[in-house]
Image: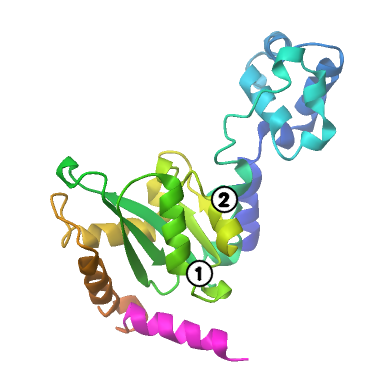
Amino acid sequence: MSAQALADVRRTRRHKLERLPELRDAVVDRLREGWSPEQIAGRLRVELGASHKLCHETIYQYIFSASVQATELARLLPELRRKRKPRNQVFPDEISIHMRPVEVYDRSQFGNWEGDPMIFERAQGDANVATLVERKTPYTVLMRNAGRKSRPIMDRLIREMSPLPAEARRSITFDRGLEFVAWRELESGMSTKSWFCDPQAPWQKGSVENMNNRIRRHLPRDTALPPQAMIALAQRLNATPRRCFGYRTPAQAFHEEMLRLETP
């Protein structure tokens, strides 16, 4: 996909009130008149009919979005609504997968990863495996976690990834699972950017999804998870030749990229 095409996709994903200035102006004018979002949405349905469907929740999301907070539109709301938090505060719009730079999207840049947890039968307790796949190479890292709480998983990820050069851990793309709600720790802990798939769209991080399908052959859901097995399995996966790399292995491809980072 070209840079222009990607920009067009991002533009269509923007908030409706950002894309449609006339509709936005109509909303803002009525906010300044003291109308509530419910009143505005209801009246616009009367005035515009089906041409511009707009619900009050869309107006609230726009008012509290990062792009317009500086305008202080929230001050125009009734007192009880001013401290309302947006529903998408855990995964805000600016970290959507659709905002990823082109070089991340097209895999031309090294150091951008995808992450996903593998869950096992209840007999294994809360133990799980976090899979990380580098998008360009595709080198794989496996981490056994004792639980599914997000902060410990992020802390473990920082311990595993921070020894790499910053250019080798630029970003990680996740889905919106509860395991990743502490994603901000990655940026503060090792300056790694997080991106998130759309809700219920795990296929958008296809590299790690495909890798997990491979791993399931070795780790079915009833498998015990000794940490040593994770190391051995990751080494085996990374030593398997790939046709798309001219039958080089992911380990070779990753090593070559690391050497390029060291070359001035």
Viewer-side residue, 75 vs 18:
75
Density class for disc 2 (Cα within 10 Å; few <14, some 14-19, many ≥20) is some
The answer to whether residue 186 shows anywhere in this view is yes
Residue 127: give x, y in percent of width and height.
26, 50
Residue at horizontal 65%, vertical 17%? 56
Q: Quadrant of the C terminus?
A: bottom right
Residue at horizontal 43%, vertical 60%? 157
Viewer-side residue, 12 vs 247:
247
Residue 128 vertical position relative to residue 256 in the rendered view, above or below:
above
Inspect the image, locate mark 2, and give the three-letter code of the amino acid beneath it: Arg
Residue 198: give x, y in percent of width and height.
48, 42
Residue at horizontal 61%, vertical 52%? 99
Q: What SS does tag 1 mark?
A: loop
Q: Quadrant of the N terminus?
A: bottom right
Residue at horizontal 63%, vertical 62%? 3
Residue 42 vertical position relative to residue 175 in the rendered view, above or below:
above
Q: Is residue 68 magenta?
A: no
> Which of the marked residues, 1 or 2, is nearer the chain's N terminus?
1
Q: Which mark is residue 184?
A: 2
Q: Which mark is residue 41?
A: none
Dots 1, 2 in contact, CB < 8 A: no
Density class for disc 1 (Cα within 10 Å; few <14, some 14-19, many ≥20) is some
Q: What SS does tag 2 mark?
A: helix
Instruction: Answer left or right for 264 relative to 1.
Output: right
Magenta segment: 249-264
Instruction: Answer left or right for 66 relative to 31.
Output: left
Task: Tell me the residue that label 1 is attached to.
Answer: 162
Snapshot colouring: rainbow
Quadrant in the picture for residue 90: top right
Residue 171: give x, y in percent of width and height.
53, 62
Inspect the image, locate mark 1, and give the three-letter code of the amino acid beneath it: Ser
